Amino acid sequence: MFIIIGSVVVLLAVLGGFALEGGPFLVLIQVAEFVIIGGSAIGAMLIMTPLPVLKKIINKVLGALKGSKISKATYLSLLKLMFEVFQVTRRDGLIALESHVESPDKSSIFSKYPDLLQQGNVVLFMCDTLRLIVMGGIMSHDIEGLMDIDIESHHQDGAKPGMILQKVGDSMPGLGIVAAVLGIVITMQAINGPPEEIGHKVAAALVGTFLGIFLSYGFIQPLATNLDLAAEEEANMLEAIKAGIVSLAKGFNPIVSVEFARRAIANDHRPTFQEMEAFVKDTKKAK
């Protein structure tokens, strides 16, 4: 939502300022410049991007347009889920977790949190690690090291869409210059023409430079930054899960383990201790 609002603000600011200066909008409508810059940018992205990453870019951009699904409520649901899962280990033993982690979509615990089930990477990360704990024979520091490897791999994978868009954004001013140079080449062929014609062709060529810079700094690079921040948010969820599970593996009780997870959450989305304490009491009453 904010991406759409921001894009509208960018357009209104630039085009509004152009109008205030008395500029005619028609001079900015240069189809050939759009074709050169847009087509070259898309082609360059196809050259540098493997198909799986390209699909991920499309999905991430569409997701960004809809707005982030991660909020304080999402983290509160995550803490509730972790507390319920940890309670099972304390009440019924580790073996009782097996059915839950093998089929989280059918689990009586995981199914209470459909918003988390939709984030497959988060649930998969949690279940894969809990499965190791159920199997036994692995120390808490080894679990922590393994989760660090998984998080790093996930972070590198999640950073690719933003990195690709950043490179495309960096190239667009140069592609705008290419369009402008081609326009100047055409202008030089009409150098003996009337001044009005030459002026029109020069203006059309300069629009190429404008479009390259405008599209890069006004849209593509901000979108790349948005994708980077979204990847960091998802990585923060994994860090919270790691903190909670490692604490559980070290022998801390469920409440303390969940508190470790809460402390790993970024301040923007971190639930308060009172909020966590409230759902802990509600869960105990329900039992």
Image (cartoon, rainbow, N blue to C red):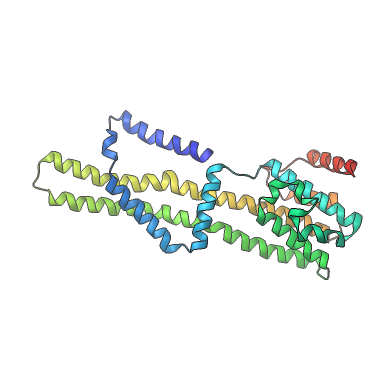
What residue is at 36 percent from the left and 34 percent from the top? 15
Query: In the picture provided, is 198 more to the left or to the right than 110?
Result: left
> Quarter of the image containing the N terminus?
top right
Q: Residue furthest front?
A: 106
Name the residue at 82% across, 53% down.
Answer: 85
Q: Is residue 38 left or right of residue 246?
A: left
Q: Position of residue 11 (x, y in %)?
A: 40, 36
Is residue 123 visible in the rendered structure shown here? Answer: yes
What residue appears at the point 66 percent right and 60 percent down from the top-left corner? 151
The image shows residue 31 at horizontal and vertical percentages of 29, 45
Q: Looking at this view, is 119 or 182 the one in front?
A: 119
Which quarter of the rendered picture does the C terminus lie within? top right
Residue 153 image offset from top left, x and y in percent:
62, 63
Q: Is residue 86 left or right of residue 15?
A: right
Instruction: Locate residue 204: give its quadrant.
Output: top left
Image position of 87 with respect to 142: above or below: above
Residue 253 can be seen in this image = no
- Label count reads 0
Residue at the bottom extreme, as displayed: 137
Residue 121 pos. (x, y %): 66, 56
* Residue occupying the point 80% across, 57% down: 100
